[in-house]
Amino acid sequence: MKKTLLTALYILITFQLSAQQESQYTQYMYNQMAINPAYAGSQDQTIVFGQYRTQWIGLDGAPKTANLSINSPISGKGHGMGISIVNDQIGPTQSTYFDINFSYAIELENFTVLYLGVKAGGSSFEIDYNKLRILTPEIEMSGKLSKFSPNIGTGIYLQNDKWYAGLSVPHILESKFYDDVRTSIASEKMHFYLHGGYIIELSENFLFKPAAMFKAVSGSPLAIDVSGNMLYNDKFTFGAAYRLNSSVSALVGFKISEQASIGYAYDYETTNIGNYARGSHEFFIKFNLEPLKKTNVGRNCWCN
């Protein structure tokens, strides 16, 4: 009974107050194009990335996210391009995003590169009333409603072989979704991201990679993610992360070959919802293809 009530409350809050917001990822540092279009092509390799996240295991209608992207340099000067497709399912709603990302590279001093990024695309938002249990008899809702919304975004990304920093607004165009009686049930608002990371070479075999991300959106508290990953022998990664007032996470990854790697993260909820859900799972598989050109990044590449 408590699970049913909690799920109903969660769906109500999600759809009426803050629905159709951007997906969250624990392992964002391995696919930063999801939050910043300027990341496209910055690793001097063609990167194919697939990711799946299932959140709040045990609650009906809990979020599920699938992400598929590819990005690559498109010139010897480091300019980049990327394409991403994201599908979000939350209760009776489903959102699908398609974006094309471009980045323009400017070489600075000390092997530092500034990337200026833009993105364009759109999203479809659909609600299936047949999956809802309507408690008010005089209100009749059935069938499906959907809406398509265009999007543009922008960002900057600064990187060398030791650190990176980025600032972005992936979705600039705010959109609203209305039902048949013109009552707003969902809105998509601008999210502002500030993210960065550093590589510390502890020894020949160990690299320590701390990272942080700050996310701000109107109507919600500031979201802060901090993490630390250890890379051993260029093959095995393990670490931990903390999302302020939300969750703690364990992360692990393995490089199957020079081209392929996999990763997994488990989030344990520190909020009251953790009393009813069995955490969240996140998986990724990534392929790093041959570089377009030799770079100074080497083993400190953020694509590892």
Image (cartoon, rainbow, N blue to C red):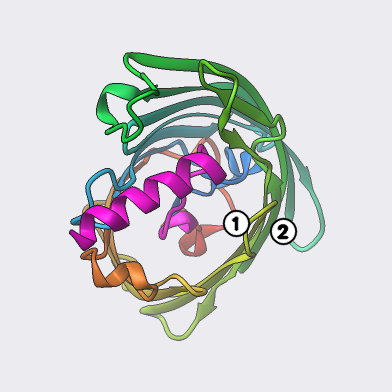
Q: CA distance from mark 2 to mark 1?
A: 7 Å
> Residue, x 72% and y 34% (percent of image)?
172
Which image quadrant is residue 91 in?
Answer: top left
Q: Using the image, determine if residue 258 lies above or below residue 209.
A: above
Q: Measured from the top left, where is residue 40 in percent x and y?
A: 58, 38
Could you tell which of marks 2 and 1 lies nearer the N-terminus? 2
Q: Which residue is mark 2?
A: 111
| Secondary element at tag 2 | loop
Q: Which residue is mark 1?
A: 296
Residues at discs 2 and 1 in contact (Cβ within 8 Å):
yes
Q: In the image, which residues are magenta? A: 1-29
Q: What's the amino acid at mark 2?
A: Phe
Q: Measured from the top left, where is residue 135 in percent x and y?
A: 31, 36
Which image quadrant is residue 37 in?
Answer: top right
Q: Using the image, determine if residue 145 lies above or below residue 23.
A: above
| Horizontal side of residue 154 vs 280, given as left or right | right
Residue 29: in sight, yes or no?
yes
